[in-house]
Image (spheres, rainbow, N blue to C red):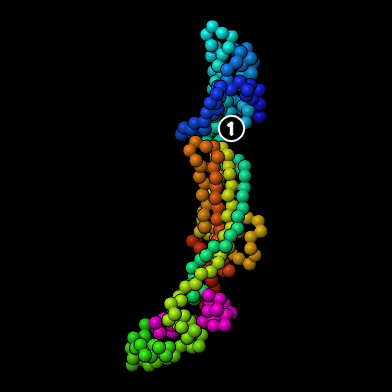
C-alpha cells in the first residue's frame, strides 16, 4: 500500500466520504507548493494511504499568482470488488435467557424424559379428555369419559396424569425455562459482512459455549450507519437440551 507522504498538507475538513450506486468514494484535498504536490501525486490506479480502493481521479490546480496549488485525489472502492469486506473486530457474548415452555416439556412430565411423573401417550390423550369433561363433580375426581358422552363409560387419570392435571387446576400450564444464548458481533470494513440462513440447527461460532446443548441460529444481520464504511454483523444462537424442529427438519423419532 502506498503511503500518504503529504498527509500534513491535507485541507481542513478532508478526507470526505461519499457513496453512489456502485462505489464508496473518498476525496482528499491538499494545499502546498505546486512542485511538491506534483512530485507526491499518486498515479491513477494505485493505492493511496489507508483509504479503501484505488485512485480513480486526480487533479492538480495551480493557485493563480502563487507557486502553490490544490491537489485533489479521489479514491474509489467499487462494490463489485469489495467481496465480504475485511473483518476488523469480533466480540463474543453468552447469557441465559428466559423462555416460556409448555408443562408437557418439563423434565418431570416430558414423554421423552425420565422424570418422577413422566407421562405416556395415553396419559396425554386422557388429560385432553379430562379437560373437556362436562361433569364438574366427576372432573374434580379426575375422571373423564372414554368416549364423547356419559354412556361411553368413565376412566380415572393415572397418578402421573393427576399430578399434571392438578397443575392445570392451579393455573400452571407453562413454566419459565432458562436457555443459553450465544452471540457474535463482528465489524467489517469496506463492505457488508456475510449473512446466512437462520432458523436452522447450527453450532455457534463462539468459544466456551455451555456443553450438552443443541443450537438453532436465530439471527444473522448486517447493518451500517449513514455513509460509514463499517458494517456490523450480529449473529445469535439459542440452545436447548434437544432441538425437536427447525425450519427444514424434525429431529424426533417415530413412536
Instruction: Count residues near mark 1 (Cα–Cα under 10 Å), then give few for <14, some for 14-19, many for 20+.
Output: some
Q: Residue 170, how many percent across, how many down? A: 44, 80
143 in relation to 91, above or below: below
Q: Nearer the viewer, residue 255 or 15?
A: 15
Q: Residue 149, how many percent across, how many down? A: 33, 88
- Segment tinted magenta in the rendering: 106-131
**Res. 30 in view:** yes
**Res. 146 in view:** no
- Number of marks in the rendered image: 1
Taking the spot 55% from the left edge, 26% from the top edge, the residue there is 14
Q: Residue 128, how many percent across, how many down? A: 41, 81
Q: Nearer the viewer, residue 13 or 208?
A: 13
Q: Nearer the viewer, residue 143 or 247?
A: 143
The residue at which mark 1 appears reads as 52
223 in relation to 35, above or below: below
In magenta segment, residue 113: yes
125 in relation to 45, above or below: below
- Left or right of 138, for residue 38: right
Taking the spot 54% from the left edge, 42% from the top edge, the residue there is 231
Taking the spot 37% from the left edge, 82% from the top edge, the residue there is 132
Q: Residue 82, how many percent across, how many down? A: 56, 37
SS at badge 1: loop
In magenta segment, residue 18: no
Taking the spot 52% from the left edge, 52% from the top edge, the residue there is 220
- Left or right of 65, for residue 206: right
Q: Which quarter of the figure is the N terminus placed in? A: top right
Quarter-of-image position of residue 134: bottom left
Amino acid at each position: 500500500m502506498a503511503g500518504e507522504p503529504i498527509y500534513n498538507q491535507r485541507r481542513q475538513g478532508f478526507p470526505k466520504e461519499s457513496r453512489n450506486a456502485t462505489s464508496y468514494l473518498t476525496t482528499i484535498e491538499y494545499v502546498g507548493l505546486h512542485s511538491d504536490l506534483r512530485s507526491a501525486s499518486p498515479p491513477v490506479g494505485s493505492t493511496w494511504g489507508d483509504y479503501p480502493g484505488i485512485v480513480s481521479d486526480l487533479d492538480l490546480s495551480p493557485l493563480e499568482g502563487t507557486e502553490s496549488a490544490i491537489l485533489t485525489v479521489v479514491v474509489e472502492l467499487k462494490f463489485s470488488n469489495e467481496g465480504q469486506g475485511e473483518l476488523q473486530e469480533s466480540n463474543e457474548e453468552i447469557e441465559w435467557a428466559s423462555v416460556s415452555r409448555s408443562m408437557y416439556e418439563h423434565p418431570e412430565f416430558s414423554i421423552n424424559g425420565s422424570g418422577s411423573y413422566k407421562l405416556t401417550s395415553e396419559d396425554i390423550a386422557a388429560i385432553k379428555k379430562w379437560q373437556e369433561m362436562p361433569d364438574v363433580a366427576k372432573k374434580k375426581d379426575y375422571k373423564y369419559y372414554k368416549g364423547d358422552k356419559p354412556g361411553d363409560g368413565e376412566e380415572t387419570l393415572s397418578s402421573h396424569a393427576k399430578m399434571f392435571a392438578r397443575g392445570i387446576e392451579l393455573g400452571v400450564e407453562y413454566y419459565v425455562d432458562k436457555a443459553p444464548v450465544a452471540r457474535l458481533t463482528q465489524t467489517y470494513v469496506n463492505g457488508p459482512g456475510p449473512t446466512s440462513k437462520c432458523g436452522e440447527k447450527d453450532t455457534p461460532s463462539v468459544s466456551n459455549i455451555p456443553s450438552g446443548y443443541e443450537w438453532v441460529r436465530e439471527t444473522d444481520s448486517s447493518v451500517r450507519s449513514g455513509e460509514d464504511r463499517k458494517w456490523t454483523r450480529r449473529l445469535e444462537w439459542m440452545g436447548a437440551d434437544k432441538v425437536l424442529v427447525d425450519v427444514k427438519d424434525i429431529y424426533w423419532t417415530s413412536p
